[in-house]
């Protein structure tokens, strides 16, 4: 038991959220470098624009040692085991990203010092806030001219309605960037362009320490004293509880590409970031130190290894101890599942998992029996909650180029839907499948996947549909009355749940007015 508690308390499972180009990939790479998980910079990175170019995206995914959407990276640092869950880097809204955030205990928000809060930062932040995920902020690119720290901080506070405490304070910026004052440890950390991991740092006794003058100019020392005094006066003191509740974010300043500020950030995460939290289920909260294994599937990835057609289900462990070879109850199907060869994700290689604890992510190979939102236990009937499905914003019909292969297409679509890559609806009337996604870019990705993974060239075509809503009612008779009267606009999703396919906003409003007892749902919990 003590073993379990120790293992759980040293887990830090987190994600990095950022607007594209803020430096998420660079920071990821540096974190792995500091954590000793990779030897060389460049291992994680498929560079900038190329990585995001639409047509290249799938190819890049396949060719990279670490896949953009797939990656979970595990490394140790200062006695902690970090699980860094990567979120897809493209600009399109992706459900995968949101679901990944249901599997982390905290997040690092990277902001470009010249740009401040950008659209994607904001969306991702809101997704974290839904679950009160604690956030550490990293203001990046201090080696370039950017905005004043006070200005940036006030923007973060105001646009995100979040309290901020500076963990470090920058001295100068761009060409005159000298380093940071570490407010938590009273250290001066000097900046070195292209610096390695061991930045020169000077332990000082507060800001009046005469040692400051040995490394900084007099005007720099004065400015630093004034800034820090003002920052301390204006901003709340660091408060661990407030951070862990998601109300306050400590802010680090740095330059990822120059390895600067990364060590402080990691040390901060080791010290402050929460270990695994209790996880809600439909019946009770599961404590991470309970001795029976539990976990949930938050993501399915097809073809991570091109040699196999298996799919990998990413399972976030919520309690207990996993040992290789054990069996788990797959609650939805009530079947025992052999966990023969699950994988753990070390930065460059996937390796067979021998043991794992709450907070760790297991990759479980399977042939499609595991779905997003599924719960695994050692026998208890539990269902973890909070893994959302979103009503698609874009709906298109899809057809196989070869009409004789319509059946194969149906199978492919069903699998993609189970994986959570898209919503697939079968209208009660008509033969076409309707595919719904939350970001339009996903149609291209889907077409590419159906072609390469299932050998089926397909065409997506626009429809006159506006949106889809899951429908439910307390009284089954009421639901039936609605479904019967609206047959032309009803479809089933891959679980067989009824969906209302609205032609336009008016159509949806009208249905809601005519059938006040029907609930039109924008999100549905998996299963
Ligand atoms: P992303 O994953 O958030 O999209 O960002 P990524 O790490 O790819 O970084 C975006 C660009 O910002 C990259 O430049 C990267 O080198 C640069 N960058 C990251 N951190 C810093 C920093 O601390 N200072 C400065 N000045 N630049 C930084 P790129 O031109 O797109 O690619 P590259 O060829 O330079 O790598």
Image (spheres, helix red, strand yellow):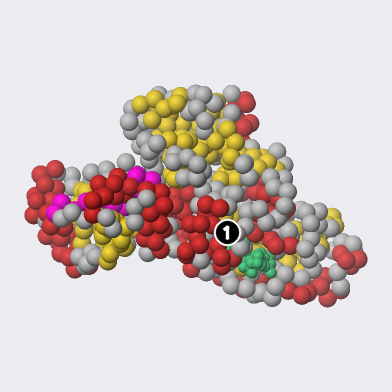
Q: What is the x, y in percent for residue 9?
A: 61, 36
Side (left or right) of 6 relative to 508: right
- Between 241 and 153, the one nearer to me in the picture: 153
513 w.r.t. 149: above or below: above
In the rendered image, is residue 15 in sight? no
Asked whether 125 falls inside the magenta stretch, the response is no
In the rendered image, is residue 309 in sight? yes
102 w.r.t. 54: above or below: above
- Between 296 and 422, the one nearer to me in the picture: 422
In magenta, the rendered stretch is 414-429
Return the residue at label 1: 109
Asked whether 415 falls inside the magenta stretch, the response is yes
Q: Quadrant of ligand 1?
A: bottom right
Q: Residue at x 52, y 59 (%)?
A: 89
Quarter of the rendering containing residue 402:
bottom left
Side (left or right) of 397 relative to 108: left
Q: Quadrant of the N terminus?
A: top right
Q: Quadrant of the C terminus?
A: top left
Q: Residue at x 54, y 51 (%)?
A: 67
Q: Residues within 10 Å of mark 1 (few under 14, many from 20)?
A: many
Q: What is the x, y in percent for residue 249?
A: 59, 57
69 w.r.t. 162: above or below: above
Q: Residue at x 9, y 51 (%)?
A: 484
């Amino acid at each position: 038991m003590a073993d379990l508690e120790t293992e759980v308390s040293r887990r830090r499972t987190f994600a990095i959220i950022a607007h594209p180009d803020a430096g998420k990939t660079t920071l990821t790479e540096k974190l792995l470098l500091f954590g000793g998980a990779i030897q060389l910079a460049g291992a994680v990175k498929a560079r900038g624009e190329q990585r995001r170019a639409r047509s290249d995206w799938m190819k890049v995914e396949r060719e990279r040692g670490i896949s953009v959407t797939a990656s979970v990276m595990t490394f140790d640092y200062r006695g902690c085991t970090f699980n860094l869950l990567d979120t897809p880097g493209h600009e399109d809204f992706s459900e995968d990203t949101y679901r990944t955030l249901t599997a982390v205990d905290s997040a690092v928000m990277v902001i470009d010092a010249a740009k401040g809060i950008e659209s994607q930062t904001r969306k991702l932040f809101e997704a974290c806030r839904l679950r009160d995920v604690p956030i550490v902020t990293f203001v990046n690119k201090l080696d370039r001219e950017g905005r004043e720290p006070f200005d940036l901080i006030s923007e973060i506070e105001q646009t995100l309605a979040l309290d901020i405490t500076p963990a470090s304070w920058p001295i100068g910026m761009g060409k005159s960037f000298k380093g940071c004052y570490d407010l938590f440890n009273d250290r001066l950390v000097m900046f070195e362009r292209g610096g390695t991991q061991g930045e020169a740092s000077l332990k000082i006794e507060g800001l009046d320490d005469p040692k400051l003058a040995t490394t900084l100019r007099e005007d720099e020392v004065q400015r630093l004293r004034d800034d820090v005094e003002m920052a301390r006066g204006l901003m709340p003191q660091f408060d661990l509880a407030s951070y862990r509740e998601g109300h306050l974010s400590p802010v680090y300043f740095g330059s990822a590409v120059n390895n600067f500020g990364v060590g402080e950030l990691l040390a901060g995460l080791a010290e402050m970031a929460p270990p695994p939290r209790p996880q809600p289920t439909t019946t009770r909260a599961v404590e991470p130190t309970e001795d029976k294994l539990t976990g949930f599937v938050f993501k399915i990835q097809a073809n991570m290894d091109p040699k196999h057609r298996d799919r990998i289900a990413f399972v976030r462990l919520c309690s207990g101890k996993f040992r290789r070879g054990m069996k788990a109850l797959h609650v939805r199907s009530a079947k025992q599942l052999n966990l023969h060869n699950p994988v753990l994700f070390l930065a460059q290689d996937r390796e067979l998992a021998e043991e794992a604890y709450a907070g760790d992510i297991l990759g479980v190979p399977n042939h499609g029996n595991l779905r997003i939102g599924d719960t695994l236990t050692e026998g208890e009937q539990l269902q973890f909650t909070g893994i959302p499905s979103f009503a698609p914003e874009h709906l298109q019909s899809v057809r196989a180029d070869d009409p004789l292969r319509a059946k194969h297409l149906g199978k492919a679509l069903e699998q993609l839907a189970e994986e959570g890559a898209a919503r697939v609806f079968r209208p009660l009337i008509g033969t076409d499948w309707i595919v719904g996604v939350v970001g339009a870019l996903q149609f291209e990705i889907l077409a590419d996947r159906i072609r390469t993974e299932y050998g089926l060239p397909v065409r997506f075509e626009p429809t006159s549909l506006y949106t889809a809503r899951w429908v439910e009612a307390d009284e089954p008779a009421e639901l039936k009355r609605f479904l019967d009267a609206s047959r032309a606009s009803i479809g089933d999703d891959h679980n067989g749940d009824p969906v209302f396919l609205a032609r336009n906003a008016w159509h949806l409003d009208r249905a809601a007015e005519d059938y006040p007892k029907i609930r039109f749902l924008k999100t549905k919990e998996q299963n």
